[in-house]
Image (tube, rainbow, N blue to C red):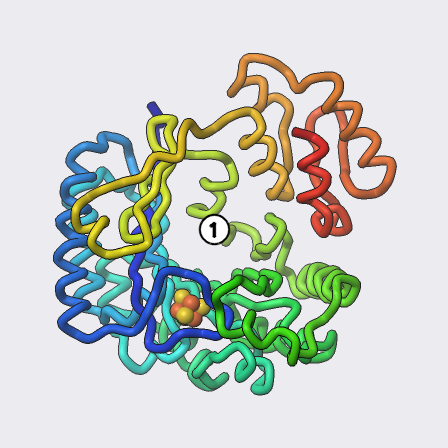
Amino acid sequence: MPEQIGLYLHIPFCKSKCSYCDFFSGAAKEADYDEYTEKLKQAVAVWGDAAPEKVKSVYFGGGTPSVLGTERLCDILDTVKASFDITENAEITLEANPESGRSLDFAKLKSAGFDRLSVGLQSANDKELKTLGRIHTLDDVACTVRLAQESGIDNISLDLMLGIPFQTKESLKNSIDFCAECGVKHISSYLLKLEKGTKLYSIKEQLALPDEDEQAELYLFAVDYLAKLGYKQYEISNFAFKGYESRHNTLYWQCGEYIGLGPSAHSFYHGRRFHFERNLQSFYDNMTVGDGEGGSEEEYTMLSLRLKTGLVYDDYIKRFNKPLSPAVLSKIQSFARMGFMDADDKHACFTPKGFLVSNTIIAELI
Ligand code: SF4
């Protein structure tokens, strides 16, 4: 049994649907928010009573949790605290939309326990934002970040997207500069993925999408420029000032266990992976779908290599009571000679160039 776990709560509502989004989320009314809040609190109470482990991180994700408003969010967090054994210094993150500065009471959220905010900026370029179907302005983001900082929430992350149609190195640099000027301590920077069924996918032929080489250039530029500004890469897509790495997401990459509640939320708990389907009723009926055993050697290797700390050989031995096989070690050495990995006798990790082809290399290793 794990000593400490994470808790993820999915809030499946958004003000409007972004053109690239494949998450289980959609627009809803106040009455839906009330109903969902009650059902989520019931689920939190049921699962919390059955989970004796300490919880070291809580993540309100979505969707856009901030649409629920301050009162409902505090109400849910109170139930979480009453039902689970939350550690004193637990990281408690709220994903918020860029306009939430106008509607949320950050001081109240802070005193309820929220200590980290994650905001979807995506880009500081109007044309790029429009293509993504985002409805916010840069003033919205700057205002939300400032109000949160003034209330004492200084652990703030902004999401940036790479590979947006029309994006150039110059526009990406401006977006990164905007984040730095806001004074945020953490930046997530994911490559745009065109998912089937999204609006963007249906018009992909008409879009000036960067090709693979251009995407690689944007990624390498971002890694380099973010480092110059003090944002150290600690995961393939995540960058932070020292001490501000996301503890919740790091738990996923370290193959730690967590409970996910809400439609489409995934869990890895007591050695098993399972999820709730992408509909409200299955969640309300507490019906999970099994995904089999988790935490295998392959899964651990794959997840650890997402982190800049990489695969630490002693940790692997502690977990599986055996070292990595000589065949895998020899492949790691050859990828290191090609410049895709850094490796010594204690660990192996990807270089920025290696992160770009990490899926292919990991498939070779496991
Ligand atoms: S705000 Fe986030 S979850 Fe909601 S539609 Fe946009 S990308 Fe999807």
Give me the residue at 38% from left, 26% from top.
271
- 75 with respect to 218 (left or right): left
Secondary structure of the residue carrying tag 1 is: loop
Looking at this rendering, what residue extends furthest in the top direction? 321
Give me the residue at 20% from left, 48% from top.
80
Instruction: Determine which quarter of the picture holds residue 179.
Output: bottom right
- Which quadrant, please, contains the C terminus? top right
Q: Is mark 1 within 8 Å of ligand 1?
A: no
- Which quadrant, please, contains the N terminus? top left
Which residue type carries mark 1? Answer: Ser
Note whether 161 is above or below 49 in the view shown: below
- 283 with respect to 130 (left or right): left
Tell me the quadrant of ligand 1: bottom left
Question: Which residue in the structure is indicated by mark 1?
Answer: 246
Nearer to the camera, 17 or 3: 17
Residue 154 drawn at (x, y percent): 42, 64
Note whether 215 is above or below 49 in the view shown: below
